[in-house]
Amino acid sequence: MQTDIDPRSLIGRKAFDRNGHKIGTVDEVYLDDATGVPEWAAVRTGLFSRDAFVPLEPSELTDDGLHIPFERSLIKDAPDFGVGRHLSPEQELQLYRHYSLTLPPPSGHVPDFGRIAGRDDAA
């Protein structure tokens, strides 16, 4: 995904699965603390439903919304950590495993994952 966009511009955008079916709306965007790059989005999957965390890489942002290259069932079965809180390294590892994504290379220090875009506090 492009890394030069304002992550707050993702909030409120429609999210689609790999088949083009709408799965929900982007509720929150989480940045990698080490790089500041948008890494995860929480997608509200229904009116009374929960948020599903989805990876922004390898997702694609287009004019009509965020296209996530995974099946709807996999997205809806993603671990639920609640929104508005920092993702711990353990939670992020669970998401990498859930989506069978390759872990990023170690940077020589233990980063503090999952800072929410637009917030300075790490609540």
Image (cartoon, grey):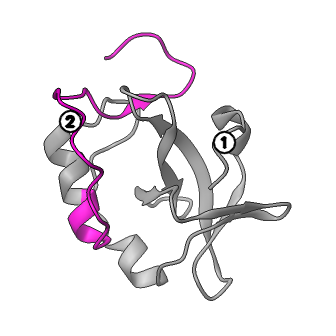
- Residue on which disc 1 sits: 11
Q: Is residue 18 above or below residue 1?
A: below
Report crowding for label 2: few under 14, some 14 to 19, many 20 or more residues within 10 A (C-alpha): some
Tag 1's secondary structure?
loop
For the stretch drawn in magenta, the main secondary structure is: loop
For label 2, the residue is 88
Q: Whole-percent x and y of residue 34?
A: 36, 27
Identify the magenta region: 95-123
Q: What residue is drawn where x is 52% and y is 55%? A: 56
Left or right: where does residue 98 sit relative to residue 36?
Answer: left
Do labels 2 and 1 touch, CB within 8 Å? no
| Residue 107 is covered by the magenta coloring | yes
Residue that appears at 41% across and 59% down: 52
Image coords of residue 30 (percent x, y): 46, 37
Q: Secondary structure at mark 2?
A: loop
Residue 108: where, in percent of width, then height? Answer: 18, 30
The nearer-to-camera label among 2 and 1 is 2
| Quadrant of image for the N terminus | bottom right
Which residue is found at the position 26% from the left and 48% from the top?
105
Q: Label 1 sits on what residue type? A: Ile
Name of the residue lying farthest toward the top: 120
Dividing the picture into quadrants, the one containing residue 21 is bottom right
- Mark with earlier residue (2, 1): 1
Q: Please tell me the numbered disc located at residue 82.
A: none
Residue 79 visible, this angle: no
Measured in 3D between alpha carbons, the distance from the residue under mark 2 to the one under mark 1, in whole angstroms, is 22 Å
Which three-letter amino acid code belongs to the residue tagged 2? Ser
Outermost residue on the right side: it is 63
